[in-house]
Image (cartoon, rainbow, N blue to C red):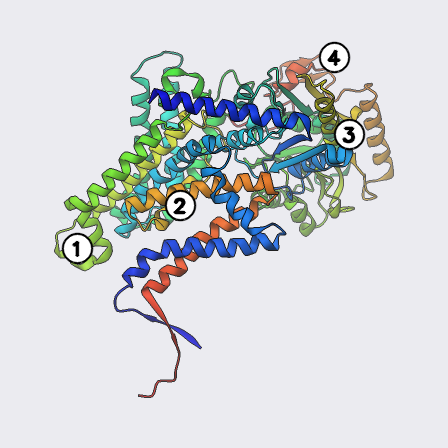
């Protein structure tokens, strides 16, 4: 029999290596899966990881990696702050939706007026929308001690209903022949989150994602608040003695992650997506949780993890189209990544021992 | 900076040229973008049957590729671009929500032909196509009105868009015609495909007394819920769903895209493809009526089949006056037939339906 024994200290080398191990294990297990499906595993894995970066059409896919990765990184950075302090915002998807609605709504309120002030206003509105939505679980937790995991998650479904209502009502395109969905912001110059340099995929959301990474890095390493966040997560009792104010920390972490998720939603709605419609949200808020953990809750790690995740999406589509792999197989492949990461994490904190009947 | 940008554009132009040029000589490549999984047993399944029919018809002369479960947004645009880059000559985008993306990508690849299902935006290289499902709904309504004993018919709506509203109106008009006491209860599921939500909706409707469930969602979950409840009848949606026959599934509307896909592929091969707007129904077979089972009384079945013939022959239009709107205002006078423009943008219920269209 095998049993798990807690390590006195987490294995530091293993902790750093675990994302790499998880990726390697995913490649092996995924390759086996693809082989079982009758595809050449080397070609399939190659298509997923190589084709978007160095293949014939990489000139198109590389910018797309930015487009796909930026919202993941932006959201995951926000989540990682709370996660480090043991504050679990699971509802980033809802905050993402609210940010998109507030941002798009702020822009469309001025349609068809053109002004350079509209887009900055939309950015503020988008961040505010996400912030507001995250304040609900935050205030409920601070005032009444409710569980922020449940409240934030449930609010995702409320936000989805709100999105449907807005797509069919207030924000519906009056020239859309009765179909749901807002006007296309790509066709409204003042509200369009266009590529800053055409053909590079670099839109304002990508810029903000990079800024968020730098800020989070500085916050965690150079700032008292960042120290408090880390301390609360690693040693809650010590944190209390160090004068950490838990309610303030909860409000800060949930508020920041909500605002960043809201920004991601706003940039997506006004840029790559163009419209808010009923199916606007495609799970960035949930995938970002994987990205945050895959990146070890570290800003640089999250940056890399976000692009890795984007790579599996884009490569996965190419594999579907070129090799006829089912979408479900790609989703299993992505799921394995988190699974193996959690498994590797377990081994950093525990060691496997053969269970011997104890003598004494 | 300027230099890199120009180089990038030159590189992309060259690659696009290569991609489209290379395929001109060999196989015709046809791409399909699906909103659901090919195994959904409904909407996407039938589009994929159309794809297989294209392969069957042209054999080695064509190559088909598809990507399934593509969200309606930037992801769809990327998938279409990827197909176009890799040399697709013809791309079918099979969901309404792909409309703007199809137009965007089509503008970048003028040599690639696009076919967008159920939308209203066209371009020189973008055709649109859809089916007159409301014709099938009329037949469903006729059967449902005859068979309900509780006089309550449950309807699972996907989204309150013209396509779905048309179906509800058509079914209601024809149920009411044979059963003046009939009442429709509508639940909006806000999804095209979500077995769990659809099952919940079906159960809620059955609990409210419905003994007929009509669905405008794509999974077989409502069929399973009806089977479990017993004594509730259903109709297959998009696909025949014959595994639930003879009860609860008593008939079905089948989307038969195969003839259209074959014809359009042939047009590309022959070089005769043009941008068109197609809206076909029972007469061309784009809308099929699945076998009416013996659970339906012979007489009702005969009437239903007679209606199908009349619609196919163009003798009967499901929206023929006198008809009023829900608010009591006049819509169609005696003998007047609805025009396609009104039908395409339909955003009102007909008189007698209760509840509001969510706004």
Return the disc, 3 or 4, that comes first in the chain's sequence. 3
* Mark 2 residue crowding within 10 angstroms, few (<14) / some (14–19) / many (20+): some
Nearest to viewer (mark 3 / mark 2): 2
Query: Which chain's residue wears label 2?
Result: A
Q: Nearer the viewer, mark 1 or mark 3?
A: 1
Where the C terminus of chain A falls, by quadrant? bottom left
The residue lying furthest to the left in this view is A242
Kindly report which numbered mark, 4 or 2, lies closer to the viewer in this rendering.
Answer: 2
Which residue is nearer to you in this view: A338 or B172? A338
Badge 2 or badge 1: first in the primary sequence: 2
Secondary structure at numbered mark 4: loop
Q: CA distance from mark 3 to mark 4?
A: 20 Å
Which residue is disc 4 drawn over?
B336
Residue that numbered label 1 is attached to: A239
Question: Residue A232: x, y in percent?
Answer: 21, 53
Asked if one can make out residue A195 in the rendered structure from this viewpoint, the answer is: no
Residue at 51% from the left image edge and 24% from the top image edge: B14
């Amino acid at each position: 029999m095998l049993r798990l024994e807690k390590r006195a200290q987490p294995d530091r080398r293993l902790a750093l290596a675990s994302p790499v191990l998880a990726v390697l294990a995913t490649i092996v297990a995924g390759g086996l899966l693809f082989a079982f499906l009758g595809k050449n595993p080397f070609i399939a894995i190659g298509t997923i990881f190589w084709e978007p970066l160095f293949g014939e059409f990489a000139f198109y896919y590389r910018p797309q990696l930015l487009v796909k990765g930026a919202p993941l990184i932006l959201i995951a950075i926000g989540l990682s702050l709370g996660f480090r302090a043991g504050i679990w915002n699971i509802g980033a998807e809802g905050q993402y939706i609210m940010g998109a609605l507030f941002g798009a709504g702020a822009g469309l309120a001025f349609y068809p007026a053109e002004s350079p002030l509209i887009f900055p206003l939309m950015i503020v509105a988008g961040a505010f929308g996400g912030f507001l939505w995250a304040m609900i679980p935050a205030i409920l937790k601070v005032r009444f001690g409710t569980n922020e995991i449940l409240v934030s998650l449930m609010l995702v479904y409320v936000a989805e209903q709100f999105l449907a209502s807005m797509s069919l009502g207030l924000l519906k395109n009056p020239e859309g022949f009765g179909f749901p969905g807002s006007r296309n912001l790509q066709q409204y110059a003042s509200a369009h989150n266009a590529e800053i340099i055409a053909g590079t995929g670099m839109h304002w959301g990508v810029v903000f994602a990079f800024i968020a990474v730098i800020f989070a890095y500085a916050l965690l390493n150079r700032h008292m608040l960042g120290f408090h966040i880390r301390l609360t997560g690693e040693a809650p009792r010590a944190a209390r003695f160090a004068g950490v104010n838990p309610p303030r920390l909860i409000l800060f972490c949930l508020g920041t992650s909500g605002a960043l998720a809201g920004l991601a939603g706003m940039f997506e709605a006004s840029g790559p997506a163009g419209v808010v419609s009923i199916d606007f949200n495609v799970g960035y808020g949930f995938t970002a949780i994987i990205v945050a953990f895959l990146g070890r809750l570290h800003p640089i790690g999250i940056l890399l993890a976000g692009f890795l995740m984007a790579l599996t999406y884009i490569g996965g589509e190419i594999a579907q189209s070129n090799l006829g792999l089912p979408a479900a197989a790609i989703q299993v492949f992505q799921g394995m990544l988190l699974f193996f990461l959690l498994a590797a994490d377990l081994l950093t904190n525990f060691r496997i021992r053969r269970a011997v009947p104890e003598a004494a | 900076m300027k230099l890199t940008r120009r180089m990038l554009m030159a590189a992309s132009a060259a690659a696009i040229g290569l991609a489209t040029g290379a395929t001109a000589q060999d196989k015709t490549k046809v791409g399909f973008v699906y909103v659901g999984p090919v195994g959904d047993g409904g909407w996407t399944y039938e589009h994929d049957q159309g794809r297989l029919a294209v392969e069957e018809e042209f054999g080695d002369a064509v190559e088909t590729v598809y990507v399934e479960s593509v969200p309606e947004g930037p992801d769809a645009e990327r998938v279409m671009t990827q197909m176009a880059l890799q040399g697709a000559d013809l791309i079918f985008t099979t969901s309404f929500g792909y409309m703007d993306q199809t137009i965007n990508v089509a503008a970048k690849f003028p040599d690639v032909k696009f076919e967008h299902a159920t939308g209203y935006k066209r371009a020189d290289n973008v055709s649109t196509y859809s089916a007159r499902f409301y014709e099938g709904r009329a037949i469903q309504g006729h059967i449902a009105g005859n068979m309900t004993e509780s006089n309550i018919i449950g309807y699972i709506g996907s989204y309150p868009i013209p396509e779905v509203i048309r179906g509800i109106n058509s079914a209601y008009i024809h149920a009411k015609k044979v059963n003046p006491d009939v009442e429709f209860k509508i639940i909006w599921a806000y999804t095209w495909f979500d077995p769990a939500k659809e099952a919940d909706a079906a159960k809620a409707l059955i609990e409210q007394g419905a003994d007929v469930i009509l669905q405008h969602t794509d999974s077989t979950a409502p069929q399973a819920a009806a089977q479990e409840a017993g004594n509730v009848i259903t109709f297959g949606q998009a696909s025949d769903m014959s595994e639930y026959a003879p009860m609860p599934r008593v008939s079905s509307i089948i989307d038969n895209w195969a003839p259209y896909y074959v014809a359009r592929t042939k047009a590309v091969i022959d070089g005769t493809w043009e941008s068109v707007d197609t809206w076909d129904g029972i007469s061309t077979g784009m809308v099929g009526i699945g076998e009416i089972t013996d659970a339906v009384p012979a007489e009702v079945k005969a009437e239903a089949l007679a209606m199908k013939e009349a619609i196919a022959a163009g003798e009967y239009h499901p929206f023929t006056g006198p008809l009023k709107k829900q608010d009591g205002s006049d819509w169609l006078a005696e003998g007047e037939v609805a025009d396609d423009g009104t039908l395409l943008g339909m955003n009102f219920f007909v008189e007698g339906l209760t509840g509001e269209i969510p706004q």
